[in-house]
Image (cartoon, rainbow, N blue to C red):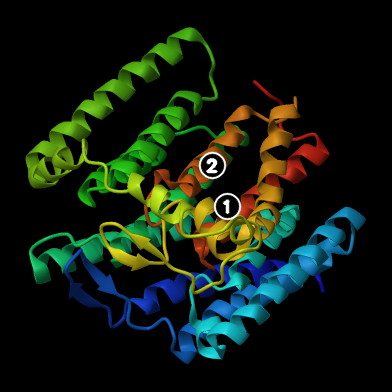
């Protein structure tokens, strides 16, 4: 496959996954049940949605195979992962049927996205991704603005649970953190436009009343802004700290003036613990062998507040519960390898760890609705990790 075709394939995958998410909310319905109010996505099993998702995954797999064949260790990893996923997908077919195996957003096939790490090691492909990140970010900002106005006009409140707002925001966040970190790695610096993006992420995290994403967006904002200057004298550092404090103050004042209800609702949530009990509940729902090899895609456990459910925010626990530590470790292996390569490298700035550390914390349950799907967020993060591995192999950028 020619280089330009590879690049076009990955761009297509990003566009297809972006369109799939937007399309899935075309006929979304607001559901008000005993335990929660949430949106039920309307089009996650239609032919159009499935074609967008699986064509993107297929293209990524084909491009990844071309890269895997260049290295014996990579090929061995890819082969083991592929055979493992095929086994669990076949098991799901037999236990739950073809319809569930194909339409489930957490089908074992989504973990093949890990192979995108090897795709990101192609510098030409990463350059194409880099050029498209600002377009993605602008698109998500526009979608968030439109959906916010629409939801408030229709329901009078911002409905977060499973709504388009939270999924657009999560995608925007990961595109943003990768984009901002990449600018620092290339010594492009953080200007007014990038500062606006940081502020937007913080403000919208408050608007959607998410404690976890406020923490993530603030951590990213502080790290990026303070380390984002290409001039490293003490005077500039002090000036940026002062500007950061002033920006934080302006954001708080803005929220108090225009989103006071959101701040009140958020303050009520700060001291509330609504998820710790899930760990005790799910721990007793599986045997030791169940944690090692999985309990099946349709396995459920009894949540003491919601009844029988299959999900949990902590994706490490979720994957291990359904598919076992066997799948979890294989899926995590390239991510851990990337993190360790940065820590050992003297040629890559440590700021390169920021998206990966944030990603691993989010998977651990810090951030809600950060589920491992076949979507833009996972693809962008995996491509970024591949790019970092490539930098490590080629000497990277000079460290500070």
Q: Residue furthest top?
A: 234
Any mark on residue 355, and which? 2
Residue 281 in the image: state x and y as whole percent.
Answer: 39, 54
Residue at disc 1, secondary structure: helix
Does the CB distance between marks 2 and 1 fall below 8 Å? Answer: yes
**Above or below for 295 versus 121:** below
Residue positioned 40% across, 32% down in the render: 219
Quadrant containing the N terminus is bottom right
What residue would you read off at disc 1?
A: 381
Closer to the camera, 172 or 308? Answer: 308
Residue at disc 2, secondary structure: helix
Tell me where residue 292 sits by quadrant. Answer: bottom right
Q: Residues within 10 Å of mark 1 (few under 14, many from 20)?
A: many
Horizontal side of residue 299 vs 162, given as left or right: right
Can you see residue 255?
yes
Tell me where residue 62 sits by quadrant. Answer: bottom right
Horizontal side of residue 75 vs 287, given as left or right: right
Residue positioned 49% across, 70% down in the render: 299
Quadrant containing the C terminus is top right
Residue positioned 71% across, 49% down in the render: 333
Closer to the camera, 322 or 107? Answer: 322
**Above or below for 329 versus 389:** below
How far is disc 2 from disc 1 in space, using C-alphas? Answer: 8 Å
Residue 66 in the image: state x and y as whole percent.
Answer: 83, 68
**Above or below for 331 versus 392:** below
- The tag earlier along the polypeptide, 2 or 1, is 2
Residue 262 in the image: state x and y as whole percent.
Answer: 14, 46
Q: Residues within 10 Å of mark 2 (few under 14, many from 20)?
A: many
Closer to the camera, 268 or 282? Answer: 282
Residue 36 in the image: state x and y as whole percent.
Answer: 20, 64
Any mark on residue 236, and which? none
């Amino acid at each position: 496959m020619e280089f330009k075709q590879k690049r076009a394939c990955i761009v297509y995958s990003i566009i297809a996954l972006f369109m799939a998410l937007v399309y899935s909310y075309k006929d979304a319905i607001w559901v008000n049940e005993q335990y929660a109010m949430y949106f039920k996505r309307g089009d996650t099993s239609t032919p159009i949605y499935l074609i967008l998702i699986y064509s993107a995954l297929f293209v990524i797999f084909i491009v990844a195979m071309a890269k895997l064949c260049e290295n014996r260790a990579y090929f061995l990893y890819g082969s083991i992962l592929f055979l493992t996923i095929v086994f669990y997908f076949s098991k799901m077919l037999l236990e739950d049927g073809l319809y569930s195996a194909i339409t489930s957003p957490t089908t074992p096939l989504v973990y093949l996205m890990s192979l995108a790490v090897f795709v990101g090691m192609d510098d030409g492909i990463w350059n194409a991704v880099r050029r498209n990140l600002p377009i993605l970010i602008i698109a998500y900002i526009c979608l968030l603005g439109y959906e916010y106005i629409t939801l408030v006009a229709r329901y009078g409140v911002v409905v977060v649970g499973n709504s388009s707002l939270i999924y657009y925001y999560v995608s925007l966040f990961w595109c943003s953190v990768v984009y901002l970190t990449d600018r620092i790695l290339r010594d492009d610096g953080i200007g007014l436009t990038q500062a606006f993006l940081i502020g937007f992420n913080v403000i919208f995290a408050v608007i959607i009343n998410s404690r976890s994403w406020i923490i993530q967006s603030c951590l990213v904002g502080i790290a990026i802004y303070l380390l984002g200057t290409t001039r490293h004298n003490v005077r500039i550092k002090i000036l940026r700290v002062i500007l950061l404090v002033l920006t934080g103050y302006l954001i708080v004042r803005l929220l108090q003036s225009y989103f006071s209800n959101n701040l009140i609702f958020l303050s009520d949530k700060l001291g509330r613990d609504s998820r710790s009990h899930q760990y005790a509940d799910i721990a007793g729902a599986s045997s030791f062998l169940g944690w090692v090899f999985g309990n099946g895609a349709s396995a459920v456990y009894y949540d003491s507040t919601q009844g029988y459910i299959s999900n949990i925010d902590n994706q490490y626990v979720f994957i291990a519960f359904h598919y076992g530590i066997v799948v979890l470790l294989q899926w995590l292996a390239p991510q851990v390898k990337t993190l360790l390569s940065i820590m050992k490298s003297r040629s890559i700035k440590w700021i390169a760890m920021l998206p990966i550390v944030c990603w691993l914390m989010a998977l651990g349950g810090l951030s809600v609705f950060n589920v491992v799907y076949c979507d833009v967020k996972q693809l962008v993060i995996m491509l970024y990790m591949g790019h970092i591995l490539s930098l490590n192999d080629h000497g990277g950028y000079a460290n500070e």
